[in-house]
Image (cartoon, grey):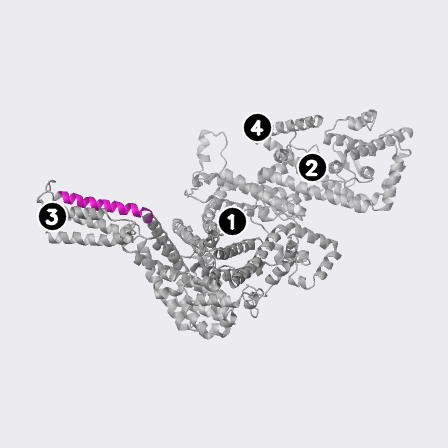
Amino acid sequence: MVDFLAENNLCGQAVLRIVSRGNAIIAELLRLSDFIPAVFRLKDKSDQQKYGDIICDFSYFKGPEYYDSKLEAKPDLQDLDDEFRENNIEILSRFYLAFESVHKYIVDLIRYLDDLYEGVYIQQTLETVLLNEDGKQLLVKNIFNYFIKMDRGTNYTCPVCLSSAARSSADSNLDDICKLLRSTGYSSQSGAKRPANYPESYFQRVPISSTFISMVIGRLRSDDIYNQVSAYPLPEHRSTALANQAAMLYVCLYFIPSILQTQQAKMREIVDKYFPDNWVISVYMGITVNLVEAWEPYKAAKIALNYTLDSANIREQASRYSVSMEGLRPQIQQLLKEGFLREEIVLDNIPKLLNCLRDCNVSIRWLMLHTADSAYDPNNKRLRQIKDQVINDSKYNPKILFQLLLDTAQFEFTLKEMFKQMLSEKQLKWESYRTEGSERMTELAEVFSGVKPLTRVEKNENLQAWFREISKQIESLNYEDSTAAGRKTVQLIQALVEVQEFHQLESNLQVCQFLADTRKFLHQMIRTINIKEEVLITMQIVGDLSYAWQIIDSFTSIMQESIRVNPSMVTKLRATFLKLASALDLPLLRINQANSPDLLSVSQFYSGELVTYVRKVLQIIPESMFTSLAKIIKLQIHAIMEVPTRLDKDKLKDYAQLGARYEVDPKQLLEDGIRKELVRRVAYALHKGLIFNPKAKTSELMPKLKEMAATMDGFYRSFEYIQDYVSIYGLKIWQEEVSRIINYNVEQECNSFLRTKIQDWQSVYQSTHIPIPKFPSVDESATFIGRLCREILRITDPKVTCYMDQLNTWYDLKTHQEVTNNRLFSEIQDTLGTFGLNGLDRLLCFMIVKELQNFLSVFQKTILRDKAMVDVFKAMLSAVNPVKGIVANASKVYANAVAKTQKIWGPYLESIMKVGQMQILRQQIANELNYSCKFDSKHLAAALENLNKSLLADIEAHYQDPSLPYPKEDNNLLYEITASLEAAGIHNPLNKIYITTKRLPYFPIVNFLFIIAQLPKLQYSKNQGMTCRKATDPVDWSPLVLGLLTLLKQFHSRYTEQFLALIGQFIRSVMEQCTSQKIPDMPSDVVGALMFLEDYVRYTKLPRKVAEAHVPSFIFDEFRTVL
């Protein structure tokens, strides 16, 4: 008959593909469980208030019109809904596809069963499939996968979000999926009440043939479908041998709940066979179920289980495993002693060693499952009593159990490695023993020929011929026919014993030695031929630890403490982790058999989970290192002085500071663990160190930056100190991880300005293995970089400070005391490095964009919609036309226009000065970055400057002659060089285009009126330049000029030309009026307007003719006399 899983067997291949897909879906559901967006849980009050109206449960489908109309009635809510969908559509689509796969899996399984009933597969029926070993395993596995997926799937379902994702799917089965996965009312929370008829009513949503289920249960009750009983020959191990089958049966019984409810005889038979000594089972990859709780609602099951849960039976089982533990510990420790497990001992004692392994694994399994916290609901009194009895009667000690697990894993690992080695060398060794034995007999035959001189051995032709024959017989033994060879080898050994006795050969010691050696070689051949792969398979079955996939986490603290006390413990832990890795075979076997493309992703998921756990355990090593590092940091900062470059010989002893030096024992530390601990500590230090009190009388900014700089320097120097001891590239790790922390925090801070947020799983800076911790917000900022930026903006606010451009300093408007200066940015450089300054610059860019967008929104929605204002602008435009001319009665015309528009300038001024303030900060950051780049890396700075100049020259040449080369769209050169130039401070923030804009009517005239409205609030001082007249009506000149300049830069250059022309006309008109009225002094407003033109030309680095095109040179000459 054709093999059931052969490629040409359509029936076998079809069911194999369904099982393979089922295993892949379970892995996907488990993977997605780590990516549920936090807002879906609505745990925070802020999330509830913000998203409560757009995230609904299954009640949405009872009245979707109500929810949709609610959204349509509020544009803000609709906008939030769109934003929410844009941010989460990618992950929602993946959830939807996973749930759709669950539905398709069940439909395909039902279709396969229908095909079997209808005879689609010739010569195959349900009965014949269930008679086949692989067939019954696969059909049982299908029901089991159905149960697991349904159980996992309902935990993550958000129907409205699914409907959002379903819209993007062409052939969506949303109604069927929601029917299948709608809420059951079940909660896995401790103490939650179980809904009536759960889970059997749940599985009736898509019913499976009851005949099929009955036949499967029949097979599970009667057969050993996984052939595991042979690996556990002892009757007391029977329940462990059938544990996988018991889990399958537990699942299948829910599909025919009448057996659980009323059929006492069947339930008694099931309990007697599968659960006579256990009541906690592992269902799948460490998911545990306590039958006491699970079968509580079912009468027949509950009565049947009562015999197992009898107090005397619990005591008997617990005591048995307690005694077993006491006997096994010294036995396994004896086996693990150095040099004890030799090849001959292993080969002579295979059954004994396997029995020891069975006893250890069975005891560990029973105790781990029946004492696991996850298996007992603390709110259930009966479960608490059972758990307490188990712990007391078994004298349970988690440390002793864990030690036995370590020793068993190590013993298992050693034995497996020895067996693998022996198996690989089996034929080679057997043939070498055969050759040695044959040669010994040939040599002995020559001895009795009388030719070979040997003391006192007479010639004996009979013995000579006999030994030659024996030599030939040994030589003729065939390795391939191991059974015949083994039988013949035993006969040969017997013959050699007899020849020694009957021919009185004992008197000759040398002949006796030859015979003994040959018998020894023949014995070795028998031992070697008995090395079989079945032993390895038995060890693999017996050593299964998949039931502890989740329980093992409860032993993490014991593992870490063991490593802390004795680092060599890592060797035994390695064996334990390898033992735990055996759990990966379970989900991957069928996927591999089906040649499914899912093999890679599923194996990566499960192995990734295991690696994550191993990292978690071994994290204690870098934690211990950083505990020592904390002491080093303390010494580096407070006790050890920096050694100067030049040092007098007589002062050498003072700087050696021998008493304060600290030694670290060299250890091989895991680099990722070191990185993880470094990231955790540095991120925490930055979070705690950069929290500011906005109500403090004097700003805490500089003191906290200095303190933080000292902390970071301590970290850096200490890391530098220990790098040689632990053999790592300390500087490389430091720069990579600190830059990652800062960039990630900048990214998270910038998220608040983005409509489509960058999620953690999308971030190039976040990592699952070396995660950057997230801390709860302490103010409106999400991270420390946001708090730092907002504190700088607060203390340099143009409303309370005055910025002196020549001094790069901010002064308080009221007290005239210095607030801060450009040293601030050097301090930030010392604290956060280039990455910190660059991140701060990037955040300021986002803030400028936001401010400009808000400004334009106000301009369009408020100013341009105010009819009175628009009329003023129209009248003003007609008054100033033509711009080249002079405005008659200038003072009155301008004063009237300013007076009528006075109400709009308050918010206008605030926005302009905010932008200007941030541009000043960006300029200071660029200066600091450029200075440090030229100082620390002059070759890089020179190379970047030259590359930038040559690129610009090439681009200009291309625009003059399009045949010359220009970077193509897919060329990232310009994008990459821009990032490098900004990091090196080789850029001008004032030339940057922050937003895209459309044509705005009256824009130049509005800005012109705005600037002349501000001029009366300012006065010119020879020492200080343009300053504010009254502290109560603050206007800071530099932010005003730079803000207006930035705003104009966002629009077409003709707006700027019109604006400058209006300023020039204003200067000429007012000067003309002064001349006609014989006013000798230049009016202050004209001085202010001329200062604006001067500063505009200076900041934009444009030629002077731009200003002189609108203002005659004699006015500038007179203006310079004023200066």
User: How far apart are labels 4 and 3 at the CA level?
Assistant: 96 Å
Residue position for label 3? 462
Q: Which of marks 3 and 2 is in front?
A: 3
**Of 760 and 174, the residue lying toward us:** 174
Q: Could you tell which of marks 4 and 1 lies nearer the N-terminus?
A: 1
- Residue 927 appears in the figure: yes
User: Tag 1: residue type?
Assistant: Pro
Direction from residue 45 to residue 456 in the image, left or right? left
The span picked out in magenta is: 423-446
Mark 1 is surrounded, within 10 Å at the Cα level, by few (under 14), some (14 to 19) or many (20 or more) other residues, namely: few
Residue 920 has which mark? 2
Relative to residue 174, is residue 450 depicted above or below? above
Residue position for label 4? 939
Q: Do the residues labelled 1 and 3 touch (CB within 8 Å)?
A: no
Direction from residue 906 to residue 15 in the image, left or right? left
Q: Label 3's element?
A: helix
Q: Nearer the viewer, mark 4 or mark 3?
A: 3
Where is residue 645 drawn, in percent x and y? 50, 30
